[in-house]
Image (spheres, coloured by chain):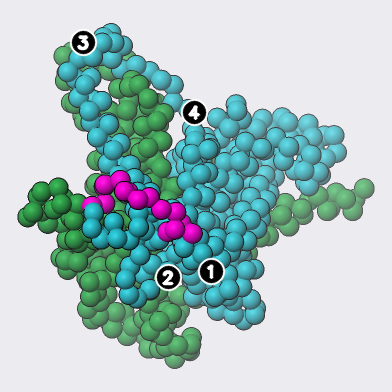
Amino acid sequence: MNRLQAAAPPMPIAHAPAAARRKRHLTPARIGVYAFLISAALFFLLPLYVMINTSFKPMQEIRMGNVFALPVAATLDPWRDAWGAVSHGFWNSVAIAVPSTVIPILLGAINGYALSFWRPRGANLLFGVLLAGAFIPVQVMIYPLVWMMAHAGVFGSLPAIVVVHVIFGMPLMTLLFRNYYASVPHELFQAARIDGGGFWRIFLQVMLPMSLPIVVVAAIMQVTGVWNDYILGLVFAGRENLPMTVQLNNVINTTTGTRLYNVNMAATILTAAVPLAIYFISGRWFVRGIAAGAVKG
Amino acid sequence: MPAQRLHSRFSPHLALLPMALTVLVAYIGGALWTLRTSFTASRTFPSDTYIGVAQYVRLFDNERWLLSLHNLAVYGAAFIVACMVIGFVLAVFIDQNVKGEGVLRTVFLYPYAMSFIATGLVWQWLLAPGSGIEGAMRQLGFEGFSFDWIVHQDLVIYTVVIATTWQASGLVMALMLAGLRGIDPEIYKAARLDGVPAWRVYLQIVLPMLGPTVATVFLLLTTSVVKLFDAVVAMTQGGPGIASEVPAKFIMDHLFLRSNIGLASSGAVTLLLPVLALLAPYAYARSRRARLNGGRA
């Protein structure tokens, strides 16, 4: 855990603002604070509630009733239909996310290690441009990449979308590992050098084994980013490999006729389920990942 | 072992080859390719016929592009202000030593784990006239209640603001809260002894101290504004009519649906300018700081 804290900004140390520390019992001001926070929380939860609520209602109830009312005759049918509509996209997203997470993490670790300890000439300049690249709208790079992929004969395939995720995931992955390794004592590296360790040996036997915390953070960020991607999957994955987000949007926005809101909401929940599950399970690690990527950027 | 020595000497360069290729080919090469294409008469395929700045003239003569820019400005201002205000206020209230802080933080941040597609689809349902919030309010007895912005030409862009603010203000809250926790608690004590009301402490003393955090948040939000695409596609598909078109969507449509690569490239270059204008001072400040700190950023 200590190592992680070195990479992420130091975790907040709870300090009690003065007023609160002295009077523990409820004053009107305290009640106001809680009232505000609770109503804000309810507003933030409202869409999730409506989503879940709608997904269990038969269409007839949706037409008649209001979005906040609980289902009268709850049904699982919308969920079955929704899974039928997006399950292909789910497995596509899994097939895209696995290599698009493993490869960027590996490259990010190598980059961060080389940048922190070996510092070859010009590497920092490259890294600066790489970081700037994270802020550039993908529209600037998208067509040249399409053109290159088409000429390499891989456009519209699984390798194409994975390569694109490697390219656009590299700034954050490199940043995370560079900052993490920057907090590793340089003496450790020097000692390994004196013992005759080469570039790859020190990486594989010294650095990688102590990188678990940052690997977890990087995996959380990358899986979430890849899973939630729409534009890259739409352009590069090809018809056979469309990720779940693209399939979901197609199902909902290009279907003509009656809108099956219950099925739509169930499908939306299914699509959001993986990153939400990661978020709720990983909790603070997720926050640390965001903070480490954002603050040091 | 000279051979192994040599091997080890060039290993860092070899290891950074993927990063170098990404930066030089995908980022810099891609941006230059797009810049070059913006001066050509490319339609369906890239062409070598240079026509000077004619594409830019055409672009700024294009009603849809001008509307897209206008929408982006309105959206950007509203979204950034809303996220900043909501994020800061939530952070300040959570910082009042409240019970259940972990739960509240989780609730405010969970939308950030959802994709723009899922976010857009949920809000599309919530804001659907007659059936979403509007329908529910009418059923609850508010017959005249009207909330049909999503089908209203002048107001539709604000529905995108609502949805994306819901998605992103938790992130601002998390970053601001981390910033607040870094502030010396003595300040609150001193201010209380001087009888300064709490709201003035936060607005006039604490907020200026959060300068770096605010700058980071501003940079993050601005880049997400420029990239705005998925949420619009999911929520409104640019409609009603072209009322909620945005530049990123204009570019994608002209690249892949309207076969006008030249015009799309000029749009992409135009979109790149504000990002560079924003990044340049940031990069300058970084490199200055790095120089002052003796080389290590």
Left or right: B229, with B19 as reference point: left
- Element assignment for label 3: helix
Q: Main secondary structure of the magenta part?
A: loop
Q: Residues within 10 Å of mark 2 (few under 14, many from 20)?
A: few
Dot in front, 2 or 1? 2
Residue under numbered circle 4:
A10
Q: Which residue is mark 3?
A: B193
Mark 4 burial class by Cα count in 10 Å: few <14, some 14-19, many 20+:
some
Chain B image colour? green
Residue A9, given in percent of the width and then of the height, sits at: 49, 32
- Type of the residue with mark 4: Pro
| Rendered image: mark on residue A250 | 2
Q: Is residue A32 above or below residue A291?
A: above
Tell me whether the residue at label 3 lies in contact with that at label 2, contact meaning CB atoms closer than 8 angstroms.
no
| The residue positioned farthest toward the top in the image shown | A22
Judged by depth in the image, the label closer to the viewer, 3 or 2, is: 2
Identify residue type, mark 1: Leu
Residue A164, position in %: x, y? 57, 65
The residue at 26%/10% (across/down) is: A25
Magenta extent = A66-80
Q: Nearer the viewer, mark 4 or mark 1?
A: 1
